[in-house]
Image (cartoon, helix red, strand yellow):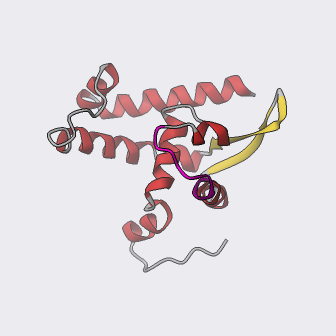
Amino acid sequence: MDVKFKCNCPFTSALDVVGDKWLLVIVKQMLIEGKETFKDFTEADEAIATNILTAKLKFLEEMGIVIKTQRPDNKKTNLYLLTEKGLALTSVLVELAFWSDKHLRDIHPTIVNGEEMELLRNDKTTFARVIENRYREKLTSLF
């Protein structure tokens, strides 16, 4: 893997890795929506083209954000799972969702609403912990 960093700034360096919109969308799909197979990702609302999805999953794997493994009960099916490095992006996704809810709802009123959004609005830390714990429980049940 040969990642080219634009400069030594930690913010810019992070964006060199996760600044592509599809990368964070894939992490969000895994963490919040439970996507874990290539087919799951292709059927998602965001409709990532398969060639882009393949490249992004490979990059995420090379960066250590996801691992590719097989389903224990079906060795033919590849699973993509978040690593600790990937789970550490939870707070970034939570902050983006919070910002979007607060600043984009007036121009995009159909942004999802409901109980989880209320929790996000009222307690970002608890919201992040809930989705991260839910993901960890899912991992435990897989293996």
Q: Quadrant of residue 115?
A: top left
90 shown above or below 73: below
* Location of residue 62 in the rendering, given as x and y in whole percent from the top left corner: 66, 61
Q: Is residue 58 visible?
A: yes
The N terminus lies in quadrant:
bottom right
Image point (39%, 70%), residue name: 12
Q: In the drawing, does residue 64 fall left or right of residue 20?
A: right
Q: Residue at x 39, y 74 (%)?
A: 9
- Residue 88 visible in the snapshot: no
Q: Report the front residue among 10 and 53.
A: 53
Query: What stretch of residues is rendered in magenta?
Result: 45-53
Counting the numbered discs, the total is 0
Residue 17 % position (x, y): 50, 64
Is residue 108 positioned above or below 1 on the image? above
Q: Residue drawn at (81%, 30%), measured in percent from left and top? A: 72
Observer-nearest residue: 51 or 106? 51
Left or right: 92 in relation to 38: left
The residue lying furthest to the right in this view is 75
Quarter of the image with the C terminus in it: top right
Give the image location of residue 81, x and y in percent. Answer: 64, 41
